[in-house]
Image (cartoon, grey):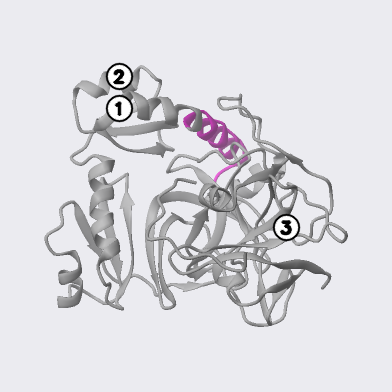
Amino acid sequence: MSSETTSARRRLATFAVAVLAMLTAAGFVGVPAAGAAPRDPARETVDQVAADLGLTPAQAWARLRAEARATLLAAPARRAAGAAYGGAVFDPATANLVVGVTDPAALARVRRTGAAARLVTASLARLDRTMGVLDVRTAPRSITGWRVDEAANLVVVTATGRGPSTAVRRFVAGLPHIRVDYRSPAVSTLAELIGGDAIYGGGARCSLGFTARRSNGTYLVLTAGHCTNIATSWSGVNRVVIGSRFGTSFPGDDFGSITVNLAAWTPTSKIKGGSSVLGSAAAPLGTTVCRSGSTTGYHCGTLTARNQTVHYPQGTVYGLSRTSACAEPGDSGGPFVSPATRQAQGVTSGGSGNCTSGGTTFFQPVGEILSAYGATLVVG
């Protein structure tokens, strides 16, 4: 399979940690049992989270442990809310998962799970319907993206410019629960069309994300689709060929894969700058995510939104996750993980800003990629 047709829409939840410059050690295929007790975060991860989020090591350790607990509460709290579910966000101030509900009767049910609960105006299903309408409209060039903001209980549209314009007003006309944020920086994909390290193809440098195994025993490198669109043959940090492109999907989605030459490369679950991944359970909004890339290395931030539509100059991508982690050109395709639970979240797509002044970075959730290729993540 040389390419894949882009989907009309993907909405899955997942993000955070580092990039494999080269596959060097054996890995094991599998997913840890749901609800397994979280492990203590590695010391180097605690130190990096503390540095990037302005915390002491003790505060970072406590936060990551609380985020792991919040992750375990997310699914039962959502089931308890039922049709009244209005989204969920980790609150660092209370170290708890806060679940929005539209029905006062659901408050007690959610609180019995151990999560906090609050009343909101719109259900997540209603916000998703608004997203669906926007996704089929033609966005003006001044629009940089749109997303469900579960903390604000709104659909937030971001746009360049200093204030309302006729084109933006037309784009959002007639839709409820919307806020437009102006003065958004322009966004771009993060592939860099120059030589460098990490993975190379067609004169471009990107970053390796995760490895996965298909049922027939073949292994794949997972990375960004705007990278795999560039070339069919890809090499690693030592310029040895990894293999040929297996699939690519961009725009619409932003994921691609490369078949691994097992004679030259060993699949592994290791993440450069972080710990090996143990699975791919989605982290709650508001929790810490970390990413690694071939340009800027390992950096952390907060998962701020899922189901983000991003309007890149090359085309629109749906169903991304939004974070406050920084990234720069060449980091595209690198892995995002949850350091609290060591769960893979996705691969870096694009964003704005840099790692000097800060910025916003989007990732393609890993669950959708695995589903598209019928693969399972290589885990430690």
Is label 1 in a helix, a strand or a loop? Answer: helix
Residue at x-position 76% and y-position 59% = 260
Q: Real-space Cα distance between discs 1 and 2?
A: 7 Å
Q: Residue furthest right?
A: 263
Viewer can see residue 252: yes
Q: Real-space Cα distance between discs 3 and 2?
A: 43 Å
Is label 3 in a helix, a strand or a loop? Answer: loop
> Which amino acid type is shown beneath numbered disc 3?
Leu
Q: Where does the image place residue 227, in percent across and percent down from the top left? A: 60, 71
> Which amino acid type is shown beneath numbered disc 1?
Ala
Q: Earlier in the sequence, mark 3 or mark 1?
A: 3
Residue at x-position 20% and y-position 41% = 122
Residue, disc 1: 81
Residue, disc 3: 20
> Is 341 included in the stretch rendered in magenta?
no
Q: What residue span does the magenta drawing correspond to?
A: 55-70
Query: Where is the C terminus found, in terms of image quarters?
Result: top right
Left or right: 263 with respect to 311? right
Q: Where does the image place residue 235, in percent across and percent down from the top left? A: 77, 71
Query: Where is the N terminus found, in terms of image quarters?
Result: bottom right
> Which amino acid type is shown beneath numbered disc 2?
Arg
Q: Where does the image place residue 149, in percent across and percent down from the top left? A: 32, 50
Q: Main secondary structure of the magenta part?
A: helix
